[in-house]
């Protein structure tokens, strides 16, 4: 049984806590949270854009700390689950690793490439496992696409295009602060950067066009350049100022003998599958494979099962490994530089 200590009880912390109740092999034994009422189990003020509403929780048997050092140095904890704001990921994770804890940290791994690199090195030096919460490959359509790409069932990957756009989250403080959240590049597009890194390998260069809001990329399209393979890969992400479409994500993935299509959006507060996962085969056949429900909570359950499997085996997950998350942040940083400079940037 992996004994988990949770750092941060906001929306994602609540999602993780509730999900641990559903999976075997791990148990939350401690939490750390600055807000006093949350330490006592009153989570009614926690809100998010999916999943259950915050409520009063029974935290009987769960230690509750106000200071991170108390959590990190608790001898009854095997793994720290970091659900703090992104600007705190690097320092807290390194402290936990140096204290001998394995760490599962929410995405992004950090807000700059140098911090991400140091986190990976710290885990290696401490001989601890560091996993990062890139949940996108656990969503059923992306999970199936990943499975098909890896199988070579339809031949080699040729490339694809990815899209992830939200309406301006004006309700979220500090969203456009590059030192706290990092804007849509690090909060939103980092999902697709990770997925592209996972299935394509690391690009050699990026060329990004779009618009900035202050010091962060607001809406942008990137061409990922692969010099040693004939991959043609692009991605569009960011925010729009209209609130009628709160969220959309989609892909078109090209294989030698098939094309994979998927398109989902939340329009007027209603989820709409604009194009379910569809396979266009080279013989003209069109198939729509069965996938999961699409409930985000199910994806987080699959993610935590992978975390527990990986931690239990003592081997980093091939999907959630920290070096992939580090590379995703490197890509995000290079994309922002390309957008600012108006030219191709080497990775």
Image: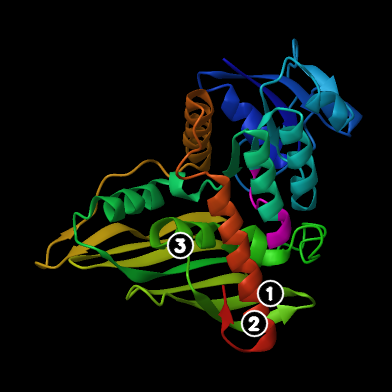
Mark yes or no: residue 241 visible.
no
Asked if disc 2 and disc 1 are in contact, CB closer than 8 Å, the reply is: yes
Q: Which mark is residue 196?
A: 3
Front residue of 10/314: it is 314
**Outermost residue toward the top in this view:** 61
Looking at the image, which residue is at 83% across and 21% down? Answer: 64
- Between the C-alphas of marks 1 and 3, the distance is 19 Å
What residue does disc 2 label?
339
What residue does disc 1 label?
217
151 left or right of 216? Answer: left
If you read the primary sequence from the N terminus, does the residue marked by circle 2 or circle 1 appear first? 1
Residue 256 drawn at (x, y percent) = 20, 68
State yes or no: residue 109 in magenta.
Answer: yes
- On screen, 1 above or below 15? above
Residue 285 drawn at (x, y percent) = 12, 62
Q: Nearer the viewer, mark 1 or mark 3?
A: 3
Count of numbered badges drawn on the protein = 3
- Between the C-alphas of marks 2 and 1, the distance is 8 Å
State yes or no: residue 69 in magenta.
Answer: no
Looking at the image, which residue is at 89% across and 34% down? Answer: 34
If you read the primary sequence from the N terminus, does the residue marked by circle 2 or circle 3 appear first? 3
Q: Secondary structure at mark 1?
A: strand
- Between the C-alphas of marks 2 and 3, the distance is 19 Å
């Amino acid at each position: 049984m992996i004994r988990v200590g949770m750092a941060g009880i906001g929306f994602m912390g609540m999602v993780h806590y509730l999900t641990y109740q559903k999976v075997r092999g791990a148990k939350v034994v401690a939490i750390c949270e600055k807000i006093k009422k949350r330490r006592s189990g009153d989570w009614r003020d926690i809100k998010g854009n999916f999943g259950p509403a915050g409520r009063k929780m029974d935290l009987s048997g769960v230690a509750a700390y106000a200071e991170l050092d108390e959590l990190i140095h608790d001898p009854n904890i095997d793994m720290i689950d970091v659900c703090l704001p992104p600007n705190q990921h690097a320092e807290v994770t390194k402290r936990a690793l140096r204290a001998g804890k394995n760490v599962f940290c929410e995405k992004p791994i950090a807000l700059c490439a140098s911090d991400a690199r140091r986190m990976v090195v710290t885990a290696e030096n401490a001989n601890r496992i560091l996993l990062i919460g890139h949940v996108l490959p656990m969503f059923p359509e992306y999970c199936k696409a990943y499975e098909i790409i890896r199988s070579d069932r339809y031949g080699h990957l040729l490339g694809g295009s990815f899209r992830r756009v939200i309406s301006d989250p004006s309700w979220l403080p500090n969203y456009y602060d590059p030192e706290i959240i990092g804007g849509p590049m690090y909060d939103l597009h980092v999902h697709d950067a990770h997925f592209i890194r996972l299935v394509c390998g690391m690009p050699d260069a990026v060329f990004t066009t779009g618009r900035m809001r202050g010091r962060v990329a607001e809406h942008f399209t990137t061409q990922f350049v692969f010099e040693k393979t004939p991959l043609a890969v692009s991605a569009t992400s960011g925010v729009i100022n209209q609130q009628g479409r709160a969220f959309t994500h989609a892909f078109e993935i090209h294989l030698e003998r098939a094309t994979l299509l998927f398109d989902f959006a939340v329009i007027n507060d209603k989820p709409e599958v604009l194009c379910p996962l569809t396979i266009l085969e080279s013989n003209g056949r069109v198939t729509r494979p069965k996938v999961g429900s699409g409930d985000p909570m199910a994806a987080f359950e699959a993610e935590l099962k992978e975390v527990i499997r990986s931690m239990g085996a003592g081997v980093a997950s091939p999907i959630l490994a920290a070096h992939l998350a580090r590379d995703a942040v490197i890509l995000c940083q290079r994309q922002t530089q390309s957008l600012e400079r108006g030219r191709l940037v080497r990775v």
